[in-house]
Amino acid sequence: MIVVTGATGNVGRPLVQALAAAGEQVTAVSRNVSATAVPEGVRPHQADLADPESLRPVLDGADALFLHDTGPNAYQLNPRDILDVAKSAGVGRVVLLSSQGVETRPESESHGGRMRAIEDAVRESGVEWTILRPGGFNSNAFAWAEPIRTQRTVFAPFGDVGLPTVDPDDIAEVAATALREKGHAGQSYVLTGPELNTPRAQAEALGAALGEPIRFVELTREEARAKLLQFIPEPVVDTTLAVLGEPKPEEQRISPDVEKVLGRAPRPFGEWAERNAAAFR
Ligand SMILES: NC(=O)c1ccc[n+]([C@@H]2O[C@H](COP(=O)([O-])OP(=O)(O)OC[C@H]3O[C@@H](n4cnc5c(N)ncnc54)[C@H](OP(=O)(O)O)[C@@H]3O)[C@@H](O)[C@H]2O)c1
């Protein structure tokens, strides 16, 4: 049995599908997951990671756990309690969805420090572990869905700054491999896409997927900051803008790790855009 937390998210959903398709017994965990949200044969289980004991019923007897932090809610998480429950329940292997920010932005609590604490808890748990450190997700482009649907326009800052954004389905496939196969224990993988994508090029790729041109309007840093502050706390906004606007060399480096694990190159942004075009129509 493999337990997948964050099972309805950008990574968890394709991970549950991949594991079920490979014939694994899977329990899909999130606060609101239901039978209609998971493939046939997958067991849904509602639990809140802020309450580690709510995981115990599904971790008892499980072989492996995919641990997903819960974004801004993770500030309330006590990862050591989650790992204690997993260990005492007999879980033998944990794959953690972390972030490249642990290495590249250690000074930032939101991008580095928070995930570093979860990584430390995983490494010190005594359970076999693999850590996944993705860069920015292609699915962050869902933030453009509404203006693309209504105005065929992307509004974004730093139009010509490229980052090797990664397809969440590739993260899921690497996770599925690390959960099912030997040879990944004690490894930390940096997961990126195959190329640098600028926001302007991403808008073009979405236009190609829709068969209609998408206008790109470059926001100033201050305009972008004001927009983001409506949704996320100030320190998170400032680090996000630093990554998008002045990426460090290691944030622009294309990692070999997806290919190392999967034996094929990571998928380009254009493929993600085609698969997800319906969200932008
Ligand atoms: N986006 C990026 O560019 C990026 C880059 C690097 C790393 N990351 C990491 O990846 C994570 C985001 O992954 P994602 O895009 O797959 O997330 P997502 O699509 O936002 O999905 C979040 C999942 O977690 C569940 N969840 C949220 N709070 C929960 C709680 N308290 N207890 C149990 N389940 C909870 C949600 O379901 P319910 O609402 O039903 O609970 C959902 O299944 C972030 O946390 C971040 O640290 C992201």
Image: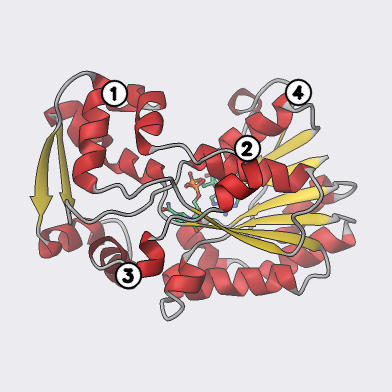
**x and y percentages locating residue 143 in the rendered image:** 29, 43
Read off the residue under disc 4: 41
**Residue marked by disc 1:** 209
In what quadrant of the picture does the N terminus appear? top right
Q: Quadrant of residue 69?
A: bottom right
How many angstroms separate mark 2 from mark 1 (CA)?
24 Å
Viewer-side label of 3, 1: 1
- Marks 3 and 1: CB-CB under 8 Å? no
Q: Which numbered marker is on residue 239?
A: 3
Residue under the image location 62 percent in, 49 percent down: 260
Vertical relation: 248 (above or below) 152: below
Q: CA distance from mark 1 to mark 4?
A: 33 Å
Residue 10 visible, this angle: no
SS at mark 4 in the image: loop
Q: Which mark is residue 15?
A: 2
Q: Earlier in the sequence, mark 3 or mark 1?
A: 1
* Image location of residue 163, percent across then percent down: 33, 54
Coordinates of residue 213 in the picture (x, y in percent): 14, 26
Viewer-nearest of discs 2 and 1? 1
Marks 4, 2: nearer the viewer: 2
Amino acid carrying label 1: it is Ala
Q: Position of residue 65 (x, y in %)?
A: 75, 50
Q: Please state if 125 lies on the left or on the right of 165 as rendered.
A: right
**Which of the marked residues, 2 or 1, is nearer the chain's N terminus?**
2
- In this figure, what is the number of numbered marks? 4
Q: Nearer the viewer, mark 1 or mark 4?
A: 1
**Image-quadrant location for residue 170:** top right
